[in-house]
Image (cartoon, rainbow, N blue to C red):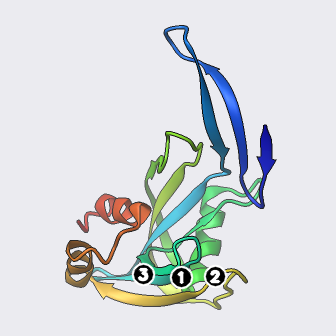
Amino acid sequence: MKVKGKRIVYQLETRRMPDGRTTTLDVIYHPGAVLIVPFLNANQLVFIRQYRAILKEYLYELPAGTLNPKENLLSCAKRELAEEIGYGAKSWKKLGKIYPVPGYSTEVIHIFKAQKLFPQKAKMDDDEMIEPIVLTRRQAQEYFKRGKIEDGKTICGLALAGWL
Protein backbone atom coordinates (compact mmCIF):
# COMPACT_ATOMS: atom_id res chain seq x y z
CA MET A 1 0.00 0.00 0.00
CA LYS A 2 1.41 3.39 -1.02
CA VAL A 3 -0.09 6.83 -0.35
CA LYS A 4 1.53 9.93 -1.83
CA GLY A 5 1.01 13.27 -0.12
CA LYS A 6 2.10 16.80 -0.95
CA ARG A 7 5.71 16.18 0.10
CA ILE A 8 5.85 12.75 1.74
CA VAL A 9 4.99 9.18 0.82
CA TYR A 10 3.54 6.63 3.22
CA GLN A 11 4.07 2.95 2.54
CA LEU A 12 3.50 -0.29 4.39
CA GLU A 13 6.61 -2.44 3.80
CA THR A 14 8.03 -5.80 4.75
CA ARG A 15 11.72 -5.70 5.69
CA ARG A 16 14.29 -8.35 6.57
CA MET A 17 16.09 -7.79 9.88
CA PRO A 18 19.83 -8.53 10.35
CA ASP A 19 18.99 -11.80 12.13
CA GLY A 20 16.87 -13.02 9.19
CA ARG A 21 13.40 -12.33 10.62
CA THR A 22 10.97 -10.27 8.59
CA THR A 23 8.80 -7.48 9.93
CA THR A 24 6.13 -5.18 8.57
CA LEU A 25 6.78 -1.45 8.94
CA ASP A 26 4.86 1.77 8.49
CA VAL A 27 7.33 3.95 6.55
CA ILE A 28 7.10 7.64 5.79
CA TYR A 29 9.53 8.67 3.07
CA HIS A 30 10.55 12.28 3.66
CA PRO A 31 12.80 14.41 1.40
CA GLY A 32 14.75 15.81 4.35
CA ALA A 33 14.83 19.20 6.01
CA VAL A 34 17.00 21.91 7.49
CA LEU A 35 16.89 23.82 10.76
CA ILE A 36 18.64 27.13 11.24
CA VAL A 37 20.01 28.55 14.50
CA PRO A 38 20.02 32.27 13.56
CA PHE A 39 22.30 34.41 15.74
CA LEU A 40 21.29 38.07 15.71
CA ASN A 41 24.36 38.58 17.93
CA ALA A 42 26.29 36.49 20.47
CA ASN A 43 23.43 36.67 23.00
CA GLN A 44 20.29 36.74 20.84
CA LEU A 45 18.62 34.23 18.53
CA VAL A 46 15.67 34.77 16.24
CA PHE A 47 12.97 32.21 16.98
CA ILE A 48 9.54 31.89 15.43
CA ARG A 49 6.17 31.50 17.07
CA GLN A 50 4.39 29.27 14.57
CA TYR A 51 0.84 27.98 14.47
CA ARG A 52 0.89 24.21 13.94
CA ALA A 53 -2.48 23.22 12.52
CA ILE A 54 -1.87 19.52 13.27
CA LEU A 55 -1.57 20.34 16.98
CA LYS A 56 -4.02 23.28 16.92
CA GLU A 57 -1.55 25.41 18.88
CA TYR A 58 1.40 27.77 18.57
CA LEU A 59 4.94 26.50 19.15
CA TYR A 60 8.21 28.33 19.72
CA GLU A 61 10.68 27.00 17.18
CA LEU A 62 13.81 27.84 15.26
CA PRO A 63 13.32 28.43 11.52
CA ALA A 64 13.21 25.21 9.51
CA GLY A 65 11.83 23.74 6.34
CA THR A 66 11.62 20.84 3.95
CA LEU A 67 13.97 20.39 1.01
CA ASN A 68 12.54 20.91 -2.45
CA PRO A 69 13.40 18.30 -5.11
CA LYS A 70 17.11 18.51 -6.08
CA GLU A 71 17.66 21.47 -3.70
CA ASN A 72 20.97 21.49 -1.82
CA LEU A 73 21.04 21.88 1.95
CA LEU A 74 22.52 25.36 2.15
CA SER A 75 20.17 26.75 -0.50
CA CYS A 76 17.24 25.37 1.48
CA ALA A 77 18.57 26.91 4.70
CA LYS A 78 19.00 30.31 3.04
CA ARG A 79 15.51 30.15 1.53
CA GLU A 80 13.88 29.17 4.82
CA LEU A 81 15.72 31.85 6.81
CA ALA A 82 14.44 34.54 4.43
CA GLU A 83 10.92 33.09 4.24
CA GLU A 84 10.39 32.63 7.95
CA ILE A 85 12.19 35.51 9.66
CA GLY A 86 13.11 37.98 6.91
CA TYR A 87 16.89 37.65 7.23
CA GLY A 88 19.84 36.48 5.21
CA ALA A 89 23.20 35.49 6.73
CA LYS A 90 26.80 36.11 5.67
CA SER A 91 28.22 33.24 7.74
CA TRP A 92 26.98 29.62 7.72
CA LYS A 93 28.22 26.55 9.58
CA LYS A 94 26.74 23.06 9.62
CA LEU A 95 26.37 21.87 13.22
CA GLY A 96 25.11 18.34 12.60
CA LYS A 97 22.06 16.31 11.72
CA ILE A 98 19.29 14.48 13.54
CA TYR A 99 16.84 11.70 12.76
CA PRO A 100 13.67 13.01 14.44
CA VAL A 101 11.52 9.85 14.17
CA PRO A 102 13.65 6.89 12.99
CA GLY A 103 11.01 4.37 14.02
CA TYR A 104 8.81 5.23 11.03
CA SER A 105 10.36 8.01 8.91
CA THR A 106 13.40 8.47 6.70
CA GLU A 107 13.53 12.19 7.57
CA VAL A 108 16.94 13.71 8.29
CA ILE A 109 17.14 17.29 9.58
CA HIS A 110 20.41 19.09 8.90
CA ILE A 111 21.19 21.83 11.44
CA PHE A 112 22.98 25.04 10.49
CA LYS A 113 24.27 28.00 12.49
CA ALA A 114 23.68 31.34 10.73
CA GLN A 115 25.56 34.48 11.79
CA LYS A 116 26.06 38.05 10.56
CA LEU A 117 22.37 38.41 9.78
CA PHE A 118 21.04 41.13 7.50
CA PRO A 119 17.43 42.07 6.71
CA GLN A 120 15.92 40.41 3.67
CA LYS A 121 12.37 40.38 2.34
CA ALA A 122 10.26 37.69 4.05
CA LYS A 123 7.95 35.59 1.88
CA MET A 124 6.00 33.13 4.01
CA ASP A 125 4.38 30.05 2.52
CA ASP A 126 0.58 30.26 2.17
CA ASP A 127 0.02 27.55 4.79
CA GLU A 128 2.17 29.21 7.47
CA MET A 129 1.32 31.55 10.34
CA ILE A 130 4.69 32.73 11.70
CA GLU A 131 5.78 35.54 14.00
CA PRO A 132 9.55 36.11 14.43
CA ILE A 133 10.60 36.63 18.06
CA VAL A 134 14.05 37.51 19.43
CA LEU A 135 15.12 35.76 22.62
CA THR A 136 18.28 36.16 24.66
CA ARG A 137 20.16 33.10 25.79
CA ARG A 138 18.72 33.47 29.30
CA GLN A 139 15.17 33.84 27.94
CA ALA A 140 15.56 30.79 25.69
CA GLN A 141 16.84 28.70 28.60
CA GLU A 142 13.94 29.91 30.77
CA TYR A 143 11.40 29.11 28.01
CA PHE A 144 12.89 25.63 27.77
CA LYS A 145 12.84 25.04 31.54
CA ARG A 146 9.21 26.19 31.76
CA GLY A 147 8.15 23.89 28.90
CA LYS A 148 7.49 26.69 26.42
CA ILE A 149 9.98 25.24 23.91
CA GLU A 150 8.68 21.74 23.13
CA ASP A 151 9.74 21.26 19.52
CA GLY A 152 12.32 18.46 19.33
CA LYS A 153 14.32 19.80 16.39
CA THR A 154 14.57 23.21 18.08
CA ILE A 155 15.82 21.64 21.31
CA CYS A 156 18.46 19.71 19.33
CA GLY A 157 19.51 22.86 17.47
CA LEU A 158 19.88 24.79 20.72
CA ALA A 159 21.93 21.95 22.24
CA LEU A 160 24.22 21.71 19.20
CA ALA A 161 24.72 25.50 19.32
CA GLY A 162 25.68 25.24 23.00
CA TRP A 163 22.62 27.14 24.26
CA LEU A 164 21.20 24.39 26.50
The Cα–Cα distance between marks 3 and 2, rounded to whole angstroms, is 15 Å
**Relative to 13, 95 lies left or right:** left
Q: Residue 89's spot in the image, x, y percent? A: 52, 77
Q: Quadrant of residue 82?
A: bottom right
Which amino acid lies under the numbered mark 3 shown in the image of this protein?
Phe
The Cα–Cα distance between marks 3 and 1, rounded to whole angstroms, is 13 Å
Q: Secondary structure at mark 2?
A: loop
Establish if 75 lies above or below 20.
below
For the C terminus, the quadrant is bottom left
CB under 8 Å between discs 1 and 2: yes
44 vs 51, nearest the viewer: 51
Which amino acid lies under the numbered mark 1 shown in the image of this protein?
Tyr
Give the crowd class for mark 3: few <14, some 14-19, many >=20 residues within 10 Å. many
**Relative to 84, 151 lies left or right:** left
Tag nearer the camera, 3 or 1: 1
Q: Quadrant of residue 20?
A: top right
Q: Give the labeled residue for mark 3.
A: 47
Which amino acid lies under the numbered mark 2 shown in the image of this protein?
Glu
129 vs 123, nearest the viewer: 129
Q: Give the labeled residue for mark 2.
A: 128
The Cα–Cα distance between marks 1 and 2, rounded to whole angstroms, is 7 Å
In primary-sequence order, the first of circles 3 and 2 is: 3
Q: Residue 90's spot in the image, x, y percent? A: 51, 76
Establish if 67 lies above or below 40.
above
CB under 8 Å between discs 3 and 1: no
Establish if 155 lies above or below 55.
above
Q: Secondary structure at mark 3?
A: strand
Give the crowd class for mark 1: few <14, some 14-19, many >=20 residues within 10 Å. some
Q: Give the labeled residue for mark 1.
A: 51
Q: Residue 99's spot in the image, x, y percent? A: 48, 46
